[in-house]
Amino acid sequence: MSSADTQEDLNAVIRQHSELLAAQLHSQRESLFPPDASKSMRKFTSGEAAALLGVNDSYLRKLHLDGKGPSPEISSGNRRHYSAKDIQNLRVLLEKTARKPGDYLPGRRAGDHLQIIGVMNFKGGSGKTTSSAHLAQRLALKGYRVLAIDLDPQASLTALHGVQPEFDLLDGGTLYDAIRYEDPVPIAQVIRETYIPNLDLIPGNLELMEFEHETPRALARSNAGLFFFRVKEALAQVDEHYDVVVIDCPPQLGFLTMSALSAATGVLVTIHPEMLDVMSMSQFLRMTADLMDVIADSGADMSHDWMRYLLTRYEPTDAPQNRIVAFLRMMYGDKVLNAPMLKSTAISDAGLTKQTLYEVERSAFTRTTYDRAIESLNAVNDEIAQLIQKTWGR
């Protein structure tokens, strides 16, 4: 058999396997989210709703008894459950009588600039997409208007939010449409509402790689403009509609990542505290610094409101990990978030059904496992929310 025959057979096998896997994933989605294969957000207990709003459960009960705000769903045992939309409507109601602005609607006010958070690392398995998804959802549930952008051609963030690129994005629909060099569309055309109030999504797929291929050709043309402004200029079109943008960057330092980095006001670097990952991050940081110098020399403002490292998949009982964590905290000080994202079977098990931990029912896990994981996620995301508030001068 010739090498040409071998290559042709390999291509056929890869294509066949790709189509088979896509069909199986589509079938799984239809079985998990019938009848229209679309996702919906679960209901929240009165205790969860109260925690999200920052009030006492007894106060929510009083509002319900007084006929104020949305009526919760009453289950067996006279337990109250609220939808995510109910919680948002309660925010609007409570904000009207709040002691100070922003107690229940924490987003931007006059003079506050849009927060654009680039989540990045070019080492696979660093928890980049998991961090992006949980951050975007937590901020939305806490009352921020959030736009999540999947800039990774592998599109894992997209799949987590119920969009399957092979079936749902046959005619484009990614950020590439809004940042391409020829006939870009308004960014509003590629934004999708999600099943979570306050959270919109720009999905991703392999088409994003076209930007990597086209940029060198565009740079060769004198009238092409500067590629690193493409994402920033596209987001400027919808600036007033959002408080926070969360960008799940590709696991590589290509043109997409550099354009996202130029648009970002905050940078979150995920780190898995293992020696190989830390060694890889050393190269990542060196390359990033060199590229930022090049971009800055071309006229871009590369200053950011903040930059933080997030420890992911952290196991407190792992002695080698603890040594690396201590090493990182000694070197970088408060640039490392206080709260780490713990490694948890609850998070990985939720991902098996293309859900985040915020979407699954607590009853799906043992109480200890779920509580440990959700407390870790909330601590991380709320610490980032505090950075956002500090940037706005609060």
Image (cartoon, helix red, strand yellow):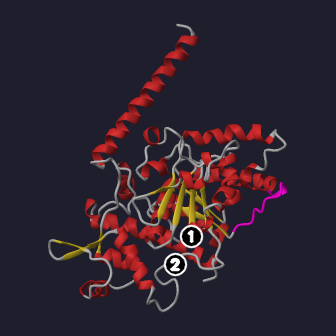
Percent x, y of residue 79: 20, 75
Identify the mark at residue 243; answer none if there is no mark: 1
Q: Which residue is mark 2?
A: 106
Q: Quadrant of residue 138?
A: bottom left
Instruction: Tell me if 333 is positioned left or right of 77 in this view.
Output: right
Give the residues in magenta.
Answer: 296-304
- Residue in the picture at 45% in, 64% down: 137
Instruction: Tell me if 277 is positioned left or right of 223 in this view.
Output: left
Whether pointer 1 and pointer 2 mark residues with C-beta atoms closer than 8 Å, the reply is: yes
Q: Is residue 350 above or below residue 146?
A: above
Q: What residue type is disc 1 on? A: Asp
- Residue in the picture at 64% in, 82% down: 393
| Helix, strand or loop status at disc 2 | loop
Q: Quadrant of the C terminus?
A: bottom right
- Residue in the picture at 53% in, 14% down: 6
Percent x, y of residue 29: 34, 45
- Residue in the picture at 33% in, 81% down: 69
Marks 1/2: CA–CA distance: 9 Å
Q: Does 229 appear in magenta?
A: no
156 or 363, nearer to the observer: 156
Going by the picture, which residue comes out furthest to the bottom? 99
Q: Does 300 appear in magenta?
A: yes
